Structures are given as C-alpha cells and as structure tokens.
Amino acid sequence: MTTISWYAFALEYLEVRWGEVSAKTRNETNDALCSITMAML
C-alpha cells in the first residue's frame, strides 16, 4: 500500500477534476478541501 499525504492527495484531486467541472463546482470543491484541511490541523 502506498502512503500519500493529505496535501498531495488534495492537489492531485484538484488537478484531475479541475477541467471537468464548472467554475461554481471548482469554487465549492476548493472551499470543501480548505475546510477539511483546517479541521485536520
């Protein structure tokens, strides 16, 4: 099993999804990932 950091996962997820979704969804996804990251700190 490969271990990946939360930060690396979030960046990879955004990179994969960014071109496929609307601007509103991009903004919501970014907000959600930021909220999750802050909760984990």
Image (spheres, grey):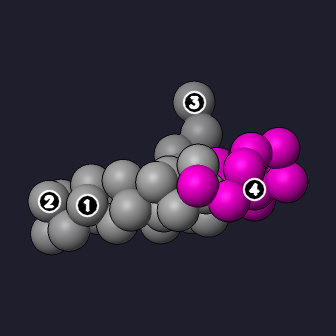
Labels 2 & 1 near each other (Cβ < 8 A): yes
Q: Secondary structure at mark 2?
A: helix
Q: Secondary structure at mark 1?
A: helix
Task: Give left or right: position of 6 versus 19.
Answer: left
Q: Main secondary structure of the magenta part?
A: helix
Give the alpha-carbon distance from disc 1 to disc 3, as whole Å.
27 Å
Task: Give left or right: position of 18 versus 39.
Answer: right
Labels 1 & 4 near each other (Cβ < 8 A): no
Q: Which residue is mark 2?
A: 39
* Between marks 2 and 4 in the image, the one whose residue lies nearer the viewer: 4
Label 4: few (<14), some (14–19) or many (≥20) C-alpha neighbours in 10 Å: some
Q: Amino acid at mark 1?
A: Ser
First in sequence: mark 2 vs mark 4: 4
Q: Quarter of the image containing the N terminus?
A: top right
Q: Which residue is mark 3?
A: 1
Is residue 5 shown to the viewer in this render? no
Stretch in magenta: 13-24
Q: Position of residue 41 (x, y in %)?
A: 15, 69
Give the alpha-carbon distance from disc 2 to disc 4, as whole Å.
23 Å
Label 1: few (<14), some (14–19) or many (≥20) C-alpha neighbours in 10 Å: few
